[in-house]
Image (spheres, rainbow, N blue to C red):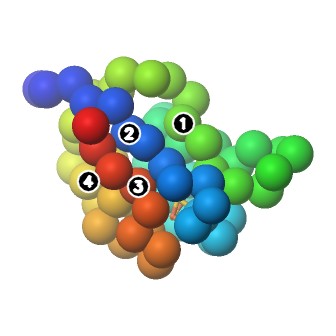
Amino acid sequence: MSLCNPVIDSYECSGCEACVELCPEVFRINEVTDKAETIHVQVEKTDALLEAVAYCPEKCIVLE
Ligand code: SF4
C-alpha cells in the first residue's frame, strides 16, 4: 500500500469531525482550535482515508 501525506486546510475546516469518524487512525480534533489535524505525517493510503477525503464537506483535505 502506498504512503501519502494528508494535509488539512485549517482555515477551511469546520471541525465537523467527519474525517475523525471515518478514519480515526489518521485524523483527530485539536482541542484548542476545534479543527481537524493529522496524527502522523505519513500514512497508508487506505480506503478509509480516501473515504474521509471524499466526504469532507469543506473539501479541505489534500493527499500529497
Ligand atoms: S471532514 Fe473536513 S471539515 Fe470536517 S473536521 Fe475533517 S477536515 Fe474539517
What residue occupies the far bottom of the structure in this picture?
57
Rendered residue at 46%/77% (across/down): 57
- In this rendering, the answer to whether 8 lies above or below 42 is below
Rendered residue at 78%/56% (across/down): 34
Asked if the residues shown at circle 3 and circle 2 are in contact, with their CB atoms under 8 angstroms apart, the answer is: yes
Q: Calculate the distance from the C-alpha at mark 1 to the C-alpha at mark 2.
A: 7 Å
Q: Calculate the distance from the C-alpha at mark 3 to the C-alpha at mark 2.
A: 7 Å
Mark 1 or 3, nearer chain start: 1
Specify the label residue 50 is tagged with.
Answer: 4
Q: Calculate the distance from the C-alpha at mark 3 to the C-alpha at mark 4.
A: 10 Å
Q: Quadrant of residue 28?
A: top right
The residue at which mark 1 appears reads as 38
Q: Which of the two marks, 2 or 4, is nearer to us in this view?
A: 2
Numbered disc 1: secondary structure: strand
Numbered disc 2: secondary structure: strand
Q: Calculate the distance from the C-alpha at mark 2 to the C-alpha at mark 4.
A: 10 Å
Q: Is mark 3 within 8 Å of ligand 1?
A: yes
Amino acid carrying label 1: it is Thr
What residue occupies the far left of the structure in this picture?
1
Amino acid carrying label 2: it is Pro
The residue at which mark 3 appears reads as 61
Asked if the residues shown at circle 1 and circle 2 are in contact, with their CB atoms under 8 angstroms apart, the answer is: yes
Mark 3 or 2, nearer chain start: 2
Within 10 Å of disc 3 (Cα), the crowding (few <14, some 14-19, many 20+) is: many
- Residue 22 visible within the image: no
Q: Position of residue 22 (x, y in %)?
A: 45, 57
Specify the label residue 6 is tagged with.
Answer: 2
